Amino acid sequence: MKLKLKTILQALGIKQAALASHLALSTATVAQIVNHGIWPKSIDQEDIKVRIVDFLQSNGAVEADLKDVFEGQEQEKSAAIETKQEETMLLRKQTLLQSTRKHFGMFLDPFANDVQSHADMYVNPEIRYVREAMFAVARHGGMLAVIAESGAGKTTLMRDLEDRIERENQPILMIRPYVLAAEDNDQKGKTLKSSHIAEAIMAAVAPLEKRKSSPEARFAQLHKALKESHTAGYRHVLVIDEAHSLPIPTIKHLKRFFELEMGFKKLLSIILIGQPELKVKLSERNADVREVVQRCEIVELAPIEPGRLEEYLKFKFDRLEKPLVEVIDASGIDALQSRLTVASTRRDRSDSVSLLYPLAIGNLLAASMNLAAEIGSPLVTADVVKGV
């Protein structure tokens, strides 16, 4: 039984070895505690728990993070989801085989490189809100965090924002700093630091200007460059993808960038895009980032509503001028929805978690279509989906 403790350690960028060192226990013993909920019998369990909590608090954990820290992961967030993901091949990319495309009379894969323009984007009320919120921040200022699971469409929304700025000829400079294979601490990989962000801003706003030598002079130079660009009629939006990998100090330093002003005008908008771990880091109870959190709106991109699954699939196939009814029947759609919904019992009440994200839907339906072609079924039916 994996403890919630493991998720908190990962969110804070703390290795189990560091916790073992603090507790004066072997890494094997700590691994048994964190990964399996097995406590050493020779040591007072309550004493270990108190010392673990103290260690987490000293490394930035807040009260909300520590709630139920020694309980097993909620089923829908651990074993049930992991099993379901494996069953539905969420972690393995599926593509339509050539024989499958011939079987269904299709020349293209509706789920591969399927968004080539804004017209190819499926938009429901949830997606529309996030899309417009991002555009409003880019145009009018503010700080926004967009949080969603892997495969929910975060990257598509970012590309859509960039495309919309260009398509509508908006006077907005979109600044995207990045470090290849960024991590949230230097032990695991490269971190995105405030100096990298400053360099990216200068490269976008004043690419030919020679950089000052001292940090304070460079920041003043950056402020001046933003003022001049604003006077010339431009807005500036800093967009950080994979923001869940940002170290806490960099998140804290975002406040200083956000406070760059000219009179009453903010010179830089900020959009953070990341997975749910970002929400943990942006806890309002975390004193290190509280001033950033107070200025940042958080929006979460939910999965596609079950009632809109058929609408979503119809949109995808209509783009290829292929009627959905020639690919999958109603029982197949119901089976897709069932396979991508995890039912569980949590604290004596029924609950469920939807995995109806675009990537998951595309993978499962592609695998089902491949199986239908292999067995000679003219349509994807419930039995075909169950056979994947």
Image (cartoon, rainbow, N blue to C red):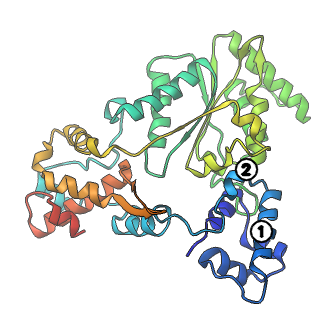
Q: How many residues crowd around disc 2 within 10 Å: few (fewer than 14), some, or many (20 or more)?
A: many
Outermost residue on the bottom side: it is: 42
Residue 187 x/y as whole percent: 75, 63
Question: Residue at coordinates 68% horizontally, 82% vertically from top-left?
Answer: 39
Q: Is residue 124 visible?
A: yes
Question: Residue at coordinates 49% horizontally, 62% vertically from top-left?
Answer: 347
**Helix, strand or loop for disc 1:** helix
Alpha-carbon distance for marks 2 and 1? 21 Å
Contact, CB < 8 Å: mark 2 with mark 1?
Answer: no
Mark 2 vs mark 1: in front = 1
Say left or right for 375 vs 235.
Answer: left
**Residue linked to disc 1:** 52
| Number of numbered callouts drawn | 2
Question: Residue at coordinates 65% horizontally, 74% vertically from top-left?
Answer: 34
Q: Is residue 95 visible?
A: no
**Helix, strand or loop for disc 2:** loop
Residue 229 x/y as whole percent: 70, 16
Name the amino acid, label 2.
Answer: Pro
Q: Is residue 348 above or below residue 211?
A: below
Q: Nearer the viewer, residue 315 or 353?
A: 353
Say left or right for 200 vs 103.
Answer: right
Q: Nearer the viewer, residue 74 or 166?
A: 74
Name the amino acid, label 1.
Answer: Ile
**Residue linked to disc 2:** 247
Specify the quadrant that holds the C terminus: bottom left
Residue 129 x/y as whole percent: 44, 29
Q: Nearer the viewer, residue 246 or 178?
A: 246
Quarter of the figure with residue 116: top left
